[in-house]
Image: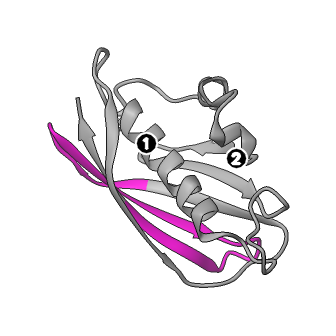
Amino acid sequence: MIWKRQPTLETMRAMSEKTLVAHLGIEFIGVGEDYLEARMPVDTRTLQPFGLLHGGASVSLAETLGSMGAYHCLEEGRTCVGLEINANHIRAVRTGWVSGQARPLHLGLTTHVWEIRINDDQGRLVCISRLTLMIL
């Protein structure tokens, strides 16, 4: 198991109150031995003007998952900040929900790299993202 601080759905929900995470409707839905899962509605908060899921909303979901995952892999007294994120948008989504799963690719002393895969309601890949974080 990778967790130094055991993530729980309740704790992650509480940490997200009154933040962009809550504003976008992102909900944490799963914790595994080496991954976190969350979902986000495709609605007026997350659409771009042409009626499709906004790429920035997908990136927000990805960064939320990767950052929360990295935080829970750190010893007490340490924290992390995002250094770089990239995303490839694969499929358009107009309605429903998208779900993301984050897993670490690298858990180093000074940096972490996380991969986040976002799927639509039918399980089809919508976006794949990689997040690099600096450990403080």
Residue 131: x %, y % from top left: 36, 57
Percent coordinates x, y for residue 96 in the rendering: 84, 67
Q: Is residue 35 visible?
A: no
Q: Which is nearer the N-term, disc 2 or disc 1?
A: 2
Describe residue 112's horizontal placement relative to residue 47 as left or right.
left
* Residue type for callout 2: Ile
Camera sees residue 69: yes
Q: Residues within 10 Å of mark 1 (few under 14, many from 20)?
A: many
Label for residue 26? Answer: 2
In this view, the residue farthest toward the left is: 109
Q: Residue 121 is drawn in which quadrant?
A: bottom right
Question: Badges 2 and 1: C-beta atoms under 8 Å apart?
Answer: no
Q: Which residues are magenta?
A: 103-130
Q: Please tell me whether mark 1 sits on a helix, a strand or a loop.
A: helix
Quadrant (top left/top right/bottom left/bottom right) for the C terminus = top left
Q: Quadrant of the N terminus?
A: top left
**In this rendering, position of residue 18 left or right of residue 64:** right
Q: Which residue is at a point 53% across and 61% down the rendered structure image?
A: 59
Amino acid type at circle 1 is: Ser
Label 2 vs label 1: CA separation?
14 Å
Observer-nearest residue: 22 or 69?
22
Q: Residue at the spot x=74%, y=61% of the render?
A: 46
> Mark number for residue 67?
1
